[in-house]
């Protein structure tokens, strides 16, 4: 049975673009969790970081994830890169009815193609992007691994294809349907 699908991974791994395409392939509604947070707080992400600190941002991020996962209609959710930092979020992402997809790539690859967009205060300091990504990768890879039902290395898609995000979305759609199918079969026998 279809449940929520959550895309996780570092900034720049393509969660939003791939998520939108995946939603259209699977005919489900797409939500970007960062956009939902901005809408709910009526603040930009840098404003939330400035007013409440990173820890305040993480608390709101957790509330937004809880709210999105509580909805009945199955959604494709692009989570912010740091969603795995809170234990309560990891518990939600590991719930059997949620399919969590980790888009992974090397820090050097992500640093080479990720820009410091306004919603990314972590990339706007003095630390060079390569170092930011290396640090975040070391801190977060074990956490992404802990929650992931499906892991997809995005780099080969970018090397081989003209439209990597479309091909990636097709591949992930197949993997999600297979995962949901095997979950339904397990449920039927147990
Ligand atoms: C963050 C990633 C951002 C956004 C915020 C914090 C992170 O989302 O939630 O700037 O901690 O990695 P994207 O991963 O969508 O860029």
Image: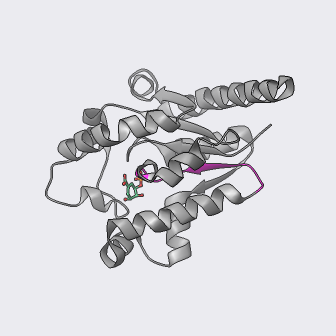
- Relative image position of residue 11 (x, y in whole percent): 38, 47
Q: Position of residue 93 (x, y in %)?
A: 57, 45
Q: Is residue 114 shown in magenta?
A: no
Q: Which residues are magenta?
A: 72-82
In this image, 142 relative to 179: left or right?
Answer: left
Residue in view at x 49 percent, y 61 percent: 34
Q: Is residue 106 visible?
A: yes
Q: Is residue 107 left or right of residue 92?
A: left
What residue is drawn where x is 35% and y is 75%? 52
Residue 164 in percent (x, y) is at: 48, 31
Scheme of colours in the image: one colour
Q: Is residue 77 magenta?
A: yes
* Residue 150, quarter of the rendered image: top right
Q: Position of residue 64 (x, y in %)?
A: 56, 64
The answer to whether 151 is drawn above or below residue 76 in the figure is: above
Tell me if 6 is positioned left or right of 152 in this view.
right
Q: How many marks?
A: 0
Q: Which sits in the foreground, 116 or 145?
A: 145
Which secondary structure class fits the magenta region best?
loop
Nearer to us in this view, 96 or 156: 96
Q: Quadrant of the N terminus?
A: top right
Task: Write the residue at 19% across / 60% down.
Answer: 125
Q: Is residue 169 above or below residue 3?
A: above
Residue 163 visible at all:
no
Q: Is residue 186 above or below residue 30?
A: above
Q: In the rendered view of the protein, which quadrant contains the C terminus?
A: top right
Question: Residue most toward the right?
Answer: 188
Identity of the residue drawn at 41% across and 22% down: 156
């Amino acid at each position: 049975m279809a449940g929520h699908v959550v895309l996780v991974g570092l900034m720049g791994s393509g969660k939003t673009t791939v998520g939108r395409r995946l939603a259209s392939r699977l005919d489900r509604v797409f939500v970007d969790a960062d956009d939902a947070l901005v809408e709910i707080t009526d603040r930009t992400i840098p404003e939330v970081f400035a007013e409440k600190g990173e820890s305040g941002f993480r608390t709101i991020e957790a509330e937004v994830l809880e709210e999105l996962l509580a909805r009945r209609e199955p959604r494709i959710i692009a989570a912010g890169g740091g969603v795995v930092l809170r234990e309560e979020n990891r518990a939600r992402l590991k719930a059997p009815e949620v399919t969590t997809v980790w888009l992974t790539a090397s820090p050097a690859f992500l640093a080479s193609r990720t820009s410091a967009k306004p919603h990314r205060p972590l990339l706007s300091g003095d630390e060079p992007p390569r170092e930011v990504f290396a640090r975040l990768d070391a801190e977060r890879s074990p956490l992404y691994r802990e929650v992931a039902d499906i892991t997809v290395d995005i780099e080969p898609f970018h090397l081989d294809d003209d439209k990597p995000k479309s091909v990636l979305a097709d591949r992930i759609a197949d993997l999600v349907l297979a995962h949901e199918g095997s979950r339904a079969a397990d449920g039927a026998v147990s």
